[in-house]
Amino acid sequence: MRKRKVVALTLLWVLILILQGYWLFESGRLSRAAERERAQQAARGAELYAANCMACHGPEGEGVTGPPLNRSEFRAEGLTPVQIAATEEMLTKVIARGRPGFDHPTWRVEGGKVHSYTRMPTWSVEDNGPLNEQEIRDLVTFIMYGDWKQPGRALQQHPELTRVKVTEYATNPETGQQEQRERPVTADDLDVEAAGLTPEENRQAKELFVRYCLACHTLGSYGGVIGPNLTQAGNWLPSVEFAKRWISNPQSFKPEERMPTVWHGQGTPMDLTEVFRQEADKLQSRMPPFGETLSEEQIDLLARFLVGLGTQEGGQAQGGAAGGTSGSGAGGS
């Protein structure tokens, strides 16, 4: 009897050890599987970000005409499970449903927090947007866990996201069949005109834009997504002088000068110079200077062209811009 008890207890302890070992192994396996799934989701989210979000929020989430997304408050590191769940829910709702606001860039930084008044479109299929539930989940995972260098790499792997070529169909004289061909975008393909410029000046400015700006910036139906869409630049560029300085040397601007126009909710400009300085390391432009590449006449023409886009009044330059500490995010790339 005693012998059977010893055997039973021994078997019980062996079973307990086996179960503990299995639990430890299985929990580790599940954890590794979850990490792999999260990495895959973040990679897919980076591609979605490059295709849909980069032009407004910047190639590394630094913010351009939309607010910065590479902020520590959005990252999962250091958050409790409850905080992670709350952040996921908030980001999911904002991406899915968008945000009301102005069509021109309006956002401010106060007390270390970004307050955006720029309108954001709805992105979920349920709200007539292009993204399904899984794609929105991938985007949220990227923002919270991903590497902000990933969107740039995704853009290199998917050159089709940059619309710098025109697809045409022509008849092959030998076969008589229609063939698809691609050619580089030219000035004649840009379906925009700037107010205040002659037809010849518009043509010359668009030629400069195609050569020096189109790879990063969208204009009309064509262009890149690394920098902001400039089709309506005249609605938010403060002045021709500002645009000339930005084209010549974007890095000469202090952070508070390069931000989009700053407003209260009622539309009153406000001075947040000191607050902007606190965010300086996150708001540096990645746009190269063109002061030594272009002549003064070319820079002046490009600046007048940009300020004349999207408005019959030549942008804000005609009526005076937000001065001093309020600026524009024209070259946030």
Image (tube, rainbow, N blue to C red):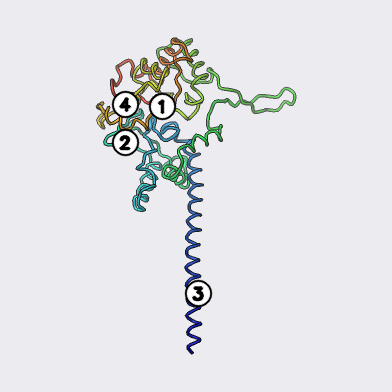
For badge 4, the amino acid type reads Glu
Which residue matches tag 3?
14
Closer to viewer: mark 3 or mark 1: 3
Crowd rating for badge 2 (residues with CA inside 10 Å; few <14, some 14–19, many 20+): some
Task: Write the residue at 40% across / 39% down.
Answer: 122
Q: Position of residue 312 (x, y in %)?
A: 38, 17
Residue 147 vs residue 256: left or right? Answer: right
Q: CA distance from mark 4 to mark 2?
A: 13 Å
> Of the residues under marks 2 and 3, which one precedes in the sequence?
3
Closer to viewer: mark 4 or mark 2: 4
- Name the quadrant of the C terminus: top left
Depicted 131 relative to depicted 171: above or below:
below
Q: Position of residue 200 (x, y in %)?
A: 48, 10
Which residue matches tag 4?
256
For badge 3, the amino acid type reads Val
Which residue matches tag 1?
285
Q: Residue furthest bottom?
A: 1
For badge 2, the amino acid type reads Val
Crowd rating for badge 4 (residues with CA inside 10 Å; few <14, some 14–19, many 20+): many
Q: Secondary structure at mark 4?
A: helix
